């Protein structure tokens, strides 16, 4: 026997090299498949994206209650159908004694008849939103005058809760006062 390896050693080394190459190729394809599965799972995860299109408030002359109206667009970018289960307004204000308070108000569609003139689409709850689609409509909230007596409004946040109890929100920066023309 000379110092040269036997043919079986050469075949074994070549087979090991081919096996290593096949395992690297398999690893790459499994990594690609896992990435695709993760992306599909992310697209199935429920998510609603609200956008504020318009926002008003109006002081009711009779009761002095403040009525808010927000025109929202709600998109569902996922591969799964979803629904808006509830819509709330979180109103932050400072009391006359400089205490910061936040009140949670549920949507009140009874105000829409008195507030908006002409036809107006309502964002009623619950509302179904198909996968990859968008809906739009007005939401209305009523705050009794006793709650805001002497208070200064600090912020508004409209919070949508979907059928999976996930919350998404939009914060109106400027809410205009709505006044009827004389």
Image (cartoon, rainbow, N blue to C red):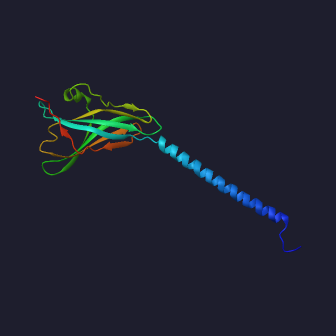
Q: Nearer the viewer, residue 136 or 152?
A: 136
**Residue 143, visible in the rendered structure:** no
Q: Residue at x 19, y 27 (%)?
A: 114
Question: Which image quarter is the C terminus in?
Answer: top left
- In the image, farthest residue toward the bottom: 3
Q: Quadrant of residue 105?
A: top left
Q: Residue at x 80, y 64 (%)?
A: 10
Task: Point out residue 117 in the picture as x, y percentages from the top left corner.
Answer: 20, 26
Q: Quadrant of residue 71?
A: top left
Tell me if residue 98 comes above or below residue 121 in the rendering.
Answer: below
Task: Point out residue 57 in the picture as x, y percentages from the top left corner.
Answer: 19, 37
Q: Is residue 113 left or right of residue 164?
A: left
The number of numbered badges drawn on the structure is 0
Task: Point out residue 39 in the picture as x, y percentages from the top left corner.
Answer: 51, 46
**Residue 153, visible in the rendered structure:** yes
Q: Residue at x 43, y 39 (%)?
A: 77
Question: Which image quarter is the N terminus in?
Answer: bottom right
Q: Residue at x 68, y 56 (%)?
A: 23
- In the image, farthest residue toward the left: 182
Task: Point out residue 141 in the picture as x, y percentages from the top left corner.
Answer: 24, 35
Q: Quadrant of residue 151?
A: top left
């Amino acid at each position: 026997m000379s110092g040269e390896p036997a043919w079986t050693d050469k075949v074994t080394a070549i087979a090991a090299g081919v096996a290593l190459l096949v395992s690297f190729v398999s690893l790459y394809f499994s990594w690609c498949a896992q990435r695709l599965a993760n992306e599909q799972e992310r697209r199935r995860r429920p998510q609603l994206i609200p956008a504020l299109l318009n926002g008003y408030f109006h002081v009711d002359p009779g009761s002095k209650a403040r009525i808010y109206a927000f025109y929202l667009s709600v998109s569902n970018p996922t591969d799964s159908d979803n629904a808006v289960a509830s819509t709330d307004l979180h109103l932050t204000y400072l009391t006359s004694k400089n205490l910061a308070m936040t009140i949670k108000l549920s949507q009140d569609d009874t105000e829409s008849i008195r507030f908006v003139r002409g036809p107006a689409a309502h964002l009623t709850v619950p509302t179904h939103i198909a996968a990859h689609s968008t809906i739009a409509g007005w939401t209305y909230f009523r705050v009794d005058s006793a709650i805001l007596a002497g208070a200064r409004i600090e912020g508004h946040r409209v919070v949508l809760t979907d059928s999976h109890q996930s919350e998404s929100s939009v914060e109106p920066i400027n809410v205009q006062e709505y006044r009827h023309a004389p």
